[in-house]
């Protein structure tokens, strides 16, 4: 709270200092113009004062500075010669200042209206994100969890990448998915998968049966909501994992999703699924047998789930982001620090802008005290 108060005071001081700039500029121009030889006229420069005001002020301040500029032009005319106030030259300059000032005030009004609309869009997007993409708990069973979502659409802040967790009687089930496309249009499709997972994920059905249920739900919903699209136009890649509390064997069903990464004893390895299923939502093509793959996640091991928005992020020269290689730099980090480093490094690689939505979930199995 103290830091926020200090920042507020600094912001107010900076605003007051900025207001003095156009006023000082008007005074300087008036003084120099009056003291200058008769053939030198600096009155046209008065327009600079209201012109720079929108950079730090709103419509009221801009209008105030514009009025001061008109008054300054009149003062120049009166101090030089009262008759000049009624000359065609000074009247033209007065009219020009009024027109420019009015235009700048209109610009400020339109800018404020757009800013209000952007704030509303951000508010709606953040509300939708909280409703659709529920935050993962930091601790669930013996697992520490951290999650990160980066939207390619900065104003949307949510898109088609999703993650979720559900507890069962004996462990935790995790889901990560990636809907075809990016931005808000894909959020509704992603919500279909999340709703189905939250409704069925906590049940004791086998993992392959859960994957089949999610696929049938997604296929039916996508077919119903995208009637104009051809077959295969909409689909969702997903990975469903089951991490037991007492057993180190993790079970996974991969539906065309990028393979997880495991960090164990400082070594980074990729868990490739030998028999991945097709992405969900492809109709009969997706109705294949869902093979359950297994790998080990021991105490102290860390697991990273991600979407292809991470590995397909390109740098300025077109190179993909080397996720597995970069993971080797932070093998000793806890899950929250790991995602912090990955976010900073990923944005540095891409120059601060992603071409696709990106989601990451980091999981660590805690060591049990002896």
Image (cartoon, helix red, strand yellow):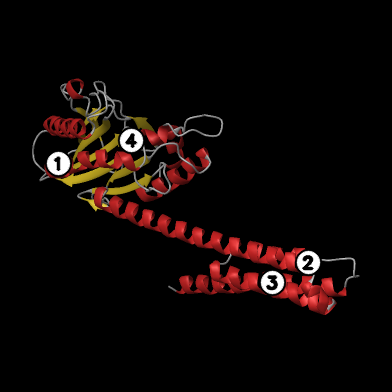
The CA distance from mark 3 to mark 1 is: 70 Å
Q: Is residue 152 left or right of residue 102?
A: left
Asked whether the residues under the numbered discs 2 and 3 touch, taking CB atoms below 8 Å apart as contact, a structural biologist would say no
307, above or below 369, in the image: above
Q: How far across and how far down the image is residue 176, in percent?
A: 27, 38
Q: Please give the label number shown on residue 169.
A: none
The CA distance from mark 2 to mark 3 is: 15 Å
Earlier in the chain: of badge 3 and badge 1, it is: 3
Q: Secondary structure at mark 3?
A: helix
Figure quadrant of the N terminus: bottom left
Asked whether the residues under the numbered discs 4 and 3 touch, taking CB atoms below 8 Å apart as contact, a structural biologist would say no
The CA distance from mark 4 to mark 3 is: 69 Å
For discs 3 and 1, the disc positioned in front in the rendered view: 3
**Residue placed most toward the observer, 202 or 120:** 120
For discs 1 and 4, the disc positioned in front in the rendered view: 1
Q: Which residue is mark 2?
A: 88
Earlier in the chain: of badge 2 and badge 4, it is: 2
The CA distance from mark 2 to mark 4 is: 80 Å
Q: Secondary structure at mark 2?
A: helix
Q: Is residue 298 visible?
A: no
The CA distance from mark 1 to mark 4 is: 23 Å
Q: Which residue is mark 4?
A: 262
Which of the 4 image quadrants contains residue 46?
Answer: bottom right
Earlier in the chain: of badge 2 and badge 3, it is: 3
Q: Please give the label number shown on residue 201.
A: 1
At a point 24% along the width and 31% down the height, the residue shown is: 295
Q: Which residue is mark 3?
A: 70
Earlier in the chain: of badge 4 and badge 3, it is: 3
């Amino acid at each position: 709270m103290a830091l926020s108060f200090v920042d507020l005071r600094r912001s107010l001081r900076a605003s007051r200092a900025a207001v003095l700039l156009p006023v000082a500029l008007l005074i300087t121009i008036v003084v120099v113009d009056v003291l200058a030889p008769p053939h030198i006229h600096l009155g046209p420069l008065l327009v600079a004062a209201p012109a720079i005001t929108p950079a730090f002020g709103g419509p009221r301040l801009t209008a105030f500075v514009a009025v001061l500029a008109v008054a300054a032009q009149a003062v120049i005319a009166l101090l030089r010669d009262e008759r000049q106030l009624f000359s065609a030259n000074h009247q033209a300059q007065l009219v020009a200042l009024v027109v420019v000032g009015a235009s700048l005030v209109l610009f400020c009004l339109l800018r404020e209206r757009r800013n209000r609309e952007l704030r509303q869009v951000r508010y709606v997007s953040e509300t939708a994100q909280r409703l659709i993409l529920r935050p993962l708990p930091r601790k669930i069973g013996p697992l520490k969890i951290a999650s990160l979502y980066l939207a390619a659409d900065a104003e949307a802040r949510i898109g088609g990448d999703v993650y979720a967790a559900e507890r069962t009687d004996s462990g935790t089930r995790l889901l990560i998915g990636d809907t075809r496309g990016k931005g808000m249009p894909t959020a509704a499709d992603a919500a279909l998968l999340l709703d189905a997972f939250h409704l069925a994920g906590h049940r004791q059905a086998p993992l392959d049966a859960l994957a089949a249920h999610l696929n049938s739900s997604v296929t039916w919903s996508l077919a119903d909501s995208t009637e104009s699209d051809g077959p295969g136009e909409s689909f969702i890649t997903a990975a469903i994992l089951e991490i037991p509390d007492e057993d180190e064997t993790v079970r996974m069903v991969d539906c065309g999703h990028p393979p997880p990464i495991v960090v164990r004893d400082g070594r980074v390895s990729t868990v490739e699924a030998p028999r991945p299923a097709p992405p969900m939502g492809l109709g009969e093509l997706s109705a294949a047998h869902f093979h359950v793959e297994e790998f080990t996640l021991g105490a102290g091991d860390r697991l990273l789930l991600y979407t292809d928005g991470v590995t397909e992020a390109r740098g300025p020269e077109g190179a993909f982001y080397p996720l597995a290689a970069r993971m080797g730099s932070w093998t000793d980090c806890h899950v929250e620090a790991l995602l912090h480093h990955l976010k900073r490094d990923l944005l540095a690689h891409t120059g601060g802008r992603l071409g696709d939505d990106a989601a990451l979930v980091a999981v660590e199995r805690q060591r049990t005290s002896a």
